[in-house]
Amino acid sequence: MRWLLRLWLAAVTLPKLPIMGSPPCIRLARIEEASALSELCVRSKATWGYDEAFMALARAVLQVSHEQIAAGDVWVATAADGEVAGMVSLGPSEQPNTLDLDKLFVEPHRIRAGVGRVLLTRAIDEARRRGATRLTILSDPYAAGFYERNGARLIGKAPSDAIPGRSVPLYEIRLD
């Protein structure tokens, strides 16, 4: 009987994860959304508890450009209420037959609601459609578990694109 009480207490006291009613819709980003998407990236990155100095350095690489959007390299996830729930973008790679996952960010109150997984799936599908056999991901260390749970394989460390002297995990997803 005690175990039943403990089970019930655990169930009612566990933090509740956000739930997104229906799966998000994915669409190409609009040029006029560039600034709002850049701010979404900053808000999402800040959830990891980075200080102001770090965020000031990271801000430049968190920008979503009009050119990226015009090239068709940026997608947004929208919730049933029409709110933008997250974004993903692809970028070129120095490696043959490879694309880089340039950005993948989710609105903080939508994290752990499946938005990231849907966005990553969209990026993988698009990379395949473009003929890539590999998708590389320069990951924030706090996001490493997400990528591993979604099939990415750690291939090493690489210099951060934002913070001088910092190394971050480098992942790949094979697409062939």
Image (spheres, rainbow, N blue to C red):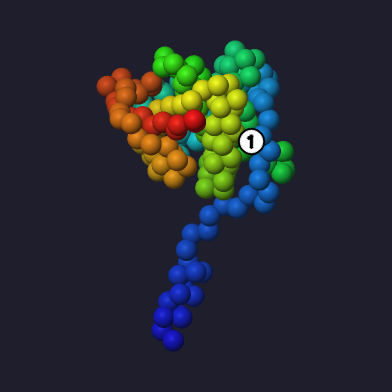
User: In the image, is 139 to the left or to the right of 81?
Assistant: left
Across and down, in percent, residue 128 comes to: 56, 27
Along the line of sight, which residue is nearer the eye, 158 or 42? 158
Left or right side of 132 for 58: left
Amino acid carrying label 1: it is Ala
Residue sitting nearer the eye, 94 or 83: 94
Q: Which of the 4 quarters of the picture holds residue 82?
A: top right
Left/right of residue 154 with respect to residue 5 in the rendered view: left
Mark 1 lies on residue: 77
Q: Circle 1 sits in a helix, a strand or a loop, which is it?
A: strand
Residue 172 visible from this viewpoint: yes
Residue at point 46% right, 21% down?
A: 98
User: Can the viewer see residue 35?
Assistant: no
Q: Nearer the viewer, residue 44 or 86?
A: 86
Query: Is 139 left, or right, of 104 in this rendering?
Result: left
State the image quarter where residue 110 is shown: top right
Quadrant containing the N terminus is: bottom left
Q: Residue at x 32, y 22 (%)?
A: 159
**Residue 161's spot in the image, x, y percent?**
38, 20
Residue at x 45% of width, y 31% of height: 174
> Quadrant location of residue 137?
top left
